[in-house]
Image: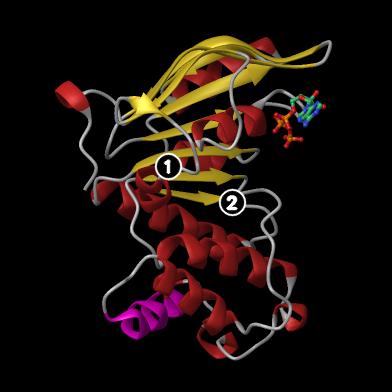
């Protein structure tokens, strides 16, 4: 398990901002995510959620500020980050010639997971994919594909789980399973950071909700308080 110095937050962003040319996608912000907690980013299209997640995952470098994982600058090429940070992105890709099971086997092989077949069977069952293990991606529905991307993050070790709109294309039952899964991740001590457009999901799983508007934090706190404030504004 990755240790954070002085018992601090596993993910620590300080004064992080991101500019694309003339566009300030993210104004300077601070964010801490601790083990066993979940922070939900919420906001309109283009408000900066994915930009922030990419920086948190070490896939993008902030224009200014510091993004630290367990006290060290985050870089997705750092083997320690690759071993501990699982990401379900908004544009995850599949290999067209590999079955669902083979995708998951590839991930368990890359992360040297013990007894991978047991893990894979369990994750397939939890994600409602048991009957699709031998299916190729092109024969899956969009919701089943999203479940495969989630499954790929769950068959590998992780201390920090980053998800970009994981509720996309999931039906209500699959969304409820997702909420249960994220609560179980917290109970296992994983730090969870997600972007979502689904207020109920945030309320069901997050300890903290951060609302972005044009790259600025406009509300931050427990989801029920934040949602009440947003309701009053509208
Ligand atoms: N690679 C890029 N180059 C230029 N501009 C970008 C790039 N990525 C994002 N942006 C811009 O930064 C802003 C924030 O985008 P971002 O994808 O972070 O928003 P978001 O909150 O995740 O939106 P959505 O809810 O639609 O996924 C947008 O104005 C977007 O056009």
Q: Residues within 10 Å of mark 2 (few under 14, many from 20)?
A: many
On the image, the x and y values in percent for residue 32 come to 37, 22
First reached walking from the N terminus: tag 2 or tag 1 = 1
On the image, the x and y values in percent for residue 106 come to 50, 75
Residue 2, located in which quarter of the rendered image? top left
- Which residue is painted at 43% across and 49% down in the image? 82
Apparent side of residue 30 relative to residue 25 in the rendered image (left or right): left
Q: Which mark is residue 111?
A: none
- Marks 2 and 1, Cα distance to the nearest angstrom? 25 Å
Q: Residues within 10 Å of mark 1 (few under 14, many from 20)?
A: few
Residue that numbered label 2 is attached to: 166
Is 119 colored magenta in this rendering?
yes
Q: Is residue 168 above or below residue 117?
A: above
Q: Secondary structure at mark 2?
A: loop
- Which residue is painted at 63% across and 15% down in the image? 63
Cβ of disc 1 within 8 Å of ligand 1?
no
On the image, the x and y values in percent for residue 156 come to 38, 63
- Which residue is painted at 50% across and 85% down in the image? 130
Residue that numbered label 1 is attached to: 78
Residues in magenta?
A: 115-125
User: Which of the image's four quarters has the C terminus?
Assistant: top right
């Amino acid at each position: 398990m990755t240790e954070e110095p002085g018992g601090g937050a596993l993910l620590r962003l300080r004064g992080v901002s991101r500019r694309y040319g003339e566009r300030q996608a993210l104004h300077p912000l601070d964010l801490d995510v601790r083990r066993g907690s979940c922070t939900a980013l919420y906001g309109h299209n283009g408000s900066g959620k994915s930009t922030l997640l990419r920086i948190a995952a070490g896939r993008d470098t902030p224009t200014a500020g510091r993004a630290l994982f367990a006290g060290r600058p985050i870089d997705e090429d750092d083997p320690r980050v690759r071993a501990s940070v699982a990401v379900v992105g908004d544009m995850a890709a599949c290999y067209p010639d590999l079955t669902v099971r083979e995708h998951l086997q590839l991930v368990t092989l890359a992360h040297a997971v013990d007894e991978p077949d047991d893990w894979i069977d369990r994750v397939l069952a939890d994600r409602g994919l048991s009957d699709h293990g031998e299916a190729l991606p092109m024969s899956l529905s969009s919701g089943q594909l999203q479940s495969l991307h989630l499954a790929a993050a769950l068959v590998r070790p992780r201390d920090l789980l980053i998800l970009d709109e994981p509720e996309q294309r999931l039906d209500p039952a699959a969304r409820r399973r997702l909420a249960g899964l994220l609560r179980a991740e917290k109970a296992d001590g994983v730090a969870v950071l997600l972007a979502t457009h689904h207020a109920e999901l945030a309320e069901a799983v997050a300890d903290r909700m951060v609302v972005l508007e044009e790259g600025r934090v406009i509300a931050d706190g427990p989801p029920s308080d934040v949602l009440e404030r947003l309701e009053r504004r509208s």
